[in-house]
Image: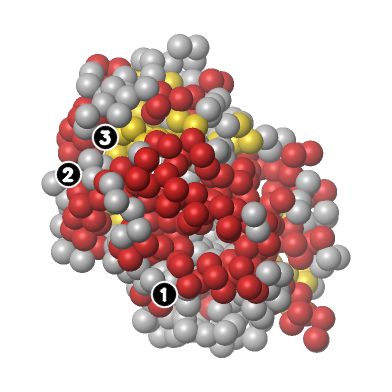
């Protein structure tokens, strides 16, 4: 009998398996698809030689993850590559604000009235970033806070809505960039704890950047799987699990799946019926005949580019998708241009590029024209560079990754108390009514992103249970 069986080879499932194997437990992991990776995959979606990331591409939380940093993933081929700028946010007048590794450079891009405000906001937390990141991404029951004073101060600033925090800024440049940071988790700007979301993304950039993985996000998954195999773990693909009886006998079962899928497989009935899924996204992967022709110079050297004219436009787009049940006329876009940091992702002189906008959960329309109109506002002539495109709305995203219910790439609405207390209001979010069944997906704290911390935290709950037995 195995000690643990893990279902799902996303970053959290792989991390959970690795953490258990490192502690001497026998582990096997099962994946329904023919390749591992979940939200960290790389595929040729458009043309031969163009390697795209169908899901996540830039990894500010990955390089800052306490779980990943404790593992020897570089030995197994993981290499982080950095663009000159982690992120840029262009404006219609041809200028841009930036999120740089340098706090001073970032502050200067906001203008003189907000430069000092920004430095005073982030510098006290940046000095304690490693302890804060570990405390923020762990639960009190899985690890005692290393710096409870800084964590408490961070909570005072971050728990209110981001709209409160943005009142500190005078000019629209700082407000707009910060609103875009909050929108990465598809959360309305006036939601609970959204200030913390924006701060975490900003601090992550200043601490270690927003890199891409050399060769694509698949490199993260491949490194975790290779390490797991060296630890004696087994990896099985093309193995769909419909019920617990489909799995080999084990002392514990750990699911990197959506809560609803887990309830169906493990026979938990209506246990997760109150779990809410959030808006979906409409994503386009592009093969380009050269770089994106940004009007502003800063986006040309940035790994990630946010597209929204001002904070009001961003807020309107988020409300349309999350509260009004409609696709925004002018979508806020998150775009990533991996080729800026990693030229090997496309043939010489060409580039890969992706963009997505937010839409209602399960939306079945086509946002291509609206997305490309937005891109043309800030990069005139963009359409002329397009060699091929691969589009994916909520139905296609859900088909590619079963955890993206209705196209929700956050694996659950990041709003209200569910932002922090997921998948249920419980001090033991990784456990279930079944004593041998656990959940470790992005539906558990600390939530969405390629960081493995949900798997790390869940593994702690599992090995404590196994040792008790």
Residue displayed at 60% across by 53% down: 126
| Tag 1 residue | 418
Mark 1 crowdedness (10 Å alpha carbons): few <14, some 14-19, many ≥20: many
Residue 41 visible at all? no
Mark 3 crowdedness (10 Å alpha carbons): few <14, some 14-19, many ≥20: many
| Tag 3 residue | 91
Classify mark 1: helix, strand or loop. Answer: helix
Residue 460 visible at all? yes
Q: Which of 332 and 88 is in front in this view?
A: 88
Classify mark 3: helix, strand or loop. Answer: loop
Q: Position of residue 33 (x, y in %)?
A: 53, 50
Q: Position of residue 189 (x, y in %)?
A: 30, 61
* Structural distance between the alpha carbons of marks 1 and 3: 33 Å
Mark 2 or 3, nearer chain start: 3
User: Viewed as shown, does residue 351 lie left or right of 266?
Assistant: left
32 w.r.t. 373: above or below: below
Mark 1 or 3, nearer chain start: 3
Q: Which of 55 and 100 is in front in this view?
A: 100
Residue displayed at 59% across by 70% down: 151
157 w.r.t. 65: above or below: below
């Amino acid at each position: 009998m195995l000690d643990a069986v893990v279902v799902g080879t996303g970053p959290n499932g792989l991390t959970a398996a690795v953490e258990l194997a490192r502690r001497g437990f026998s582990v096997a992991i099962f994946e329904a698809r023919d390749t591992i990776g979940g939200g960290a995959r790389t595929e040729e979606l458009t043309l031969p030689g163009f390697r795209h990331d169908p899901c996540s591409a830039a990894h500010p939380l990955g390089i800052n993850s306490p779980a990943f940093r404790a593992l020897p993933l570089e030995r197994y081929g993981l290499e982080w590559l950095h663009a000159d700028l982690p992120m840029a946010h262009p404006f219609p007048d041809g200028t841009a604000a930036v999120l740089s590794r340098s706090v001073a450079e970032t502050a200067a891009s906001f203008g003189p009235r907000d430069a000092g405000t920004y430095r005073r906001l982030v510098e006290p937390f940046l000095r304690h970033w490693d302890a804060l990141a570990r405390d923020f991404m762990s639960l009190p029951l899985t690890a005692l806070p290393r710096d409870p004073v800084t964590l408490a101060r961070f909570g005072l600033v971050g728990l209110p809505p981001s709209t409160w925090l943005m009142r500190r800024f005078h000019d629209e440049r700082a407000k707009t960039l910060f609103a875009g940071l909050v929108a990465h988790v598809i959360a309305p700007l006036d939601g609970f704890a959204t200030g913390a979301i924006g701060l975490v993304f900003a601090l992550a950039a200043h601490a270690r950047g927003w890199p891409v993985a050399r060769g694509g996000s698949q490199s993260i998954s491949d490194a975790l799987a290779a390490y797991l195999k060296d630890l004696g773990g087994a990896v099985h693909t093309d193995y769909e699990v419909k019920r617990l009886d489909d799995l080999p006998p084990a002392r514990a079962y750990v699911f990197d799946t959506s809560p609803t899928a887990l309830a169906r497989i493990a026979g938990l009935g209506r246990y997760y019926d109150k779990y809410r899924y959030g808006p979906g996204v409409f994503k386009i992967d592009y093969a380009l005949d050269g770089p994106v022709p940004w009007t502003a110079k800063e986006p040309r050297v940035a790994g990630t580019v946010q597209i929204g004219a001002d904070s009001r436009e961003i807020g309107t787009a988020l409300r349309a998708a999350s509260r009004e049940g409609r696709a925004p006329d002018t979508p806020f876009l998150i775009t990533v241009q991996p080729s800026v940091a990693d030229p090997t992702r496309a043939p010489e002189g060409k580039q890969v590029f992706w963009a997505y906008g937010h839409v209602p959960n399960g939306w079945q329309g086509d946002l291509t024209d609206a997305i490309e109109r937005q891109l043309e506002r800030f990069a005139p002539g963009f359409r002329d560079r397009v060699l091929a495109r691969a589009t994916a709305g909520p139905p296609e995203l859900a088909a590619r990754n079963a955890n993206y219910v209705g196209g929700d790439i956050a694996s659950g609405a990041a709003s209200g108390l569910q932002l922090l207390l997921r998948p249920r209001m419980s001090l033991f979010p990784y456990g279930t009514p079944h004593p041998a069944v656990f959940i470790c997906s992005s539906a558990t704290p600390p939530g969405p992103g390629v960081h493995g911390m949900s798997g790390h935290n869940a593994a702690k709950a599992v090995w404590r249970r196994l040792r008790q037995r």
